[in-house]
Image: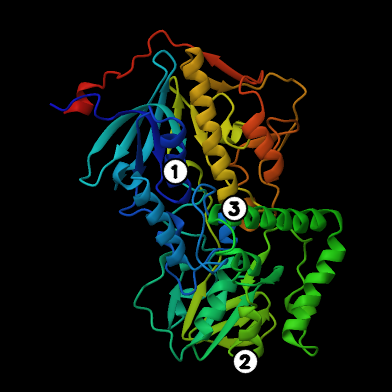
Amino acid sequence: MSDPSANHFDVLIVGAGLSGIGAAYHIQHSCPGKTYAILEGRSSMGGTWDLFRYPGVRSDSDMYTLGYRFRPWRDAKAIADGPSILQYIRETAAEYGIDRKIRYGHRAKLASWSSSDALWTVEVDTPDGATQLFTCNFLCMCSGYYNYSHGYMPGWPGMDRFAGAIVHPQKWPQDLDYANKRVIVIGSGATSVTLVPAMAESAQHVYMLQRSPSYILSLPSQDSIANFLRGKVPARLAYFLVRWKNVLISWFLYHRSRTQPEKMKHWMMGLAQKALGPDYDVAAHFNPRYNPWDQRLCLVPDGDLFRAVRSGKASMVTGEIDTFTPHGIRLRSGRELEADIIVTATGLQLQLLGGMQLCVDGAPVNLSHAMTYKGMMYSDVPNLASTFGYTNASWTLKADLTAEYVCRLLKFMDAHGYTTCTARKRDQSLGEQPAVDLTSGYIQRALDQLPKQGSKRPWRLHQNYALDLLEFRFSNVDDGTMEFSRAAGAVPHPKISAAARA
């Protein structure tokens, strides 16, 4: 019979990706007396950066902000490829001993909260096919925001007639040979603008087929200021300076896009025209229907997409699909594109908490009815934080702040003898708004699943790192919204049912 305390931890982290490894560092650094473990449903760490294996996979944020605040990014490339980011995550986990805390093949499927015990009980599918129970006092969800099992596939008429291969980037076959082949990449987002120049290097020709254009901005793959500072000032100081420089530039572009959208649109289209030449029809293929930052900008390092198009190895095609044919795709305009391979870079399926279900005192939790507190906790859900990065900046900026604030909460509760913290909506005048204000397809498809944000702080999301930094680090933990309590039944190492011990 196993020790019932063996699966009890002060903190359970779900997900061993960029967010989960960062959360683990903060917990062991700021709360060294706390026990923790990481549950990872897959067989390896890295999350997104281990899952995606398509050609050219890379970050769409610079690594001075996508990297951890506590561990400087030292590579020369600011826009890094997927394998380099994965290596960075793994090296971070090994350097701080976090890799020894990970339970691989452990997929959390249900978390049940008991107020009387101030305890989460998490049902977990294990590699041997069994169900195991874990308990914890605080639950950190670092499982990302989309479904790892499958991406979004809208489906088109005639797909079964196409004689070639149809591939989704989320399920990229490692043996796919596209050398000297004709390729159509369907989509206009970050995955498409990454795939097209990467595949164009060896493919016969690559079409980027988009229903409507996105805003595409070229950035240098290397940061000249970071490279200039390297070796001249201490690495941590250089990292701090470049990180803040990039935070401010990102904020400026976002703010300018919101306040002067027409000027930003004209500027970005002008940059595309300059990159593609005076005769290229930029208005047809780089003129989105929406304003800048209504959806995320697509970043291309060193203008690689523009170079591929200008070289003739890739073509932009804007139009609606009528049907797949045995040899490619026919558009509603009547034009036919021939292909040997079709890549459906059609987006993600948004999924909160990695698909794990929640119950509080026996009642199922519907997160679409909840409101987000500081963008990291949910109203009326105790002792649970969920990492959700910025939509207009690097994911890790918010992930770091979230983990830091969790540590502040834990230390505050310990200092005052509390066992439970719960965000409560007490202000009757509090209005509701969508938690994510992007018009992107993957957001719009999932609006009925997402929690809301409020019209006032701390329920209002800033989408501003500088404001969040001040609030997360220096605001009062006991802010009148967070309710703290002591559970009489709470014990350090709670009993686990006989079924779980068997």
Q: What element carries label 2?
A: loop
Type of residue at label 1?
Gly
Q: Nearer the viewer, mark 1 or mark 2?
A: 2
Spatial separation of the CA atoms under disc 1 and disc 2: 43 Å
Residues at marks 2 and 3, CA–CA distance in whole angstroms: 44 Å
Q: Position of residue 198 (x, y in %)?
A: 52, 79
Q: Nearer the viewer, residue 123 or 249?
A: 249
Which residue is disc 1 drawn over?
Answer: 355
| Up-down relation of residue 291 to residue 35 (above or below) | below
Q: Where is residue 239 in the image (x, y as percent from the top left)?
A: 58, 55
Task: Name the quadrant containing residue 49.
Answer: bottom left
Q: Is residue 357 above or below residue 419?
A: below
The residue under the point 57% across, 51% down is 395
The residue that label 3 is drawn on is 237
Label 1's element?
helix
Q: Left of 62 or right of it: where is 459? A: right
Q: Which of marks 1 and 3 is nearer the N terminus?
A: 3
Q: Residue lying at the far top in this picture: please name it.
A: 488
Q: In which quarter of the image is residue 221?
A: bottom right
Residue 312 image label: 2
Check disc 3: other Cα within 10 Å, few if <14, some if 14-19, many if 20+.
Answer: few
Q: Distance between the residues labelled 1 and 3?
A: 40 Å
Question: Looking at the picture, which amino acid does disc 2 mark?
Answer: Gly
Tell me the amino acid under the disc marked 3: Leu
Q: Which of marks 2 and 3 is nearer the N terminus?
A: 3
Q: Which of 361 and 426 is in front in this view?
A: 426
Q: In which quarter of the image is residue 480?
A: top right
Residue at horizontal 46 percent and vertical 65 percent from the top: 82
Residue displayed at 29% across by 47% down: 104
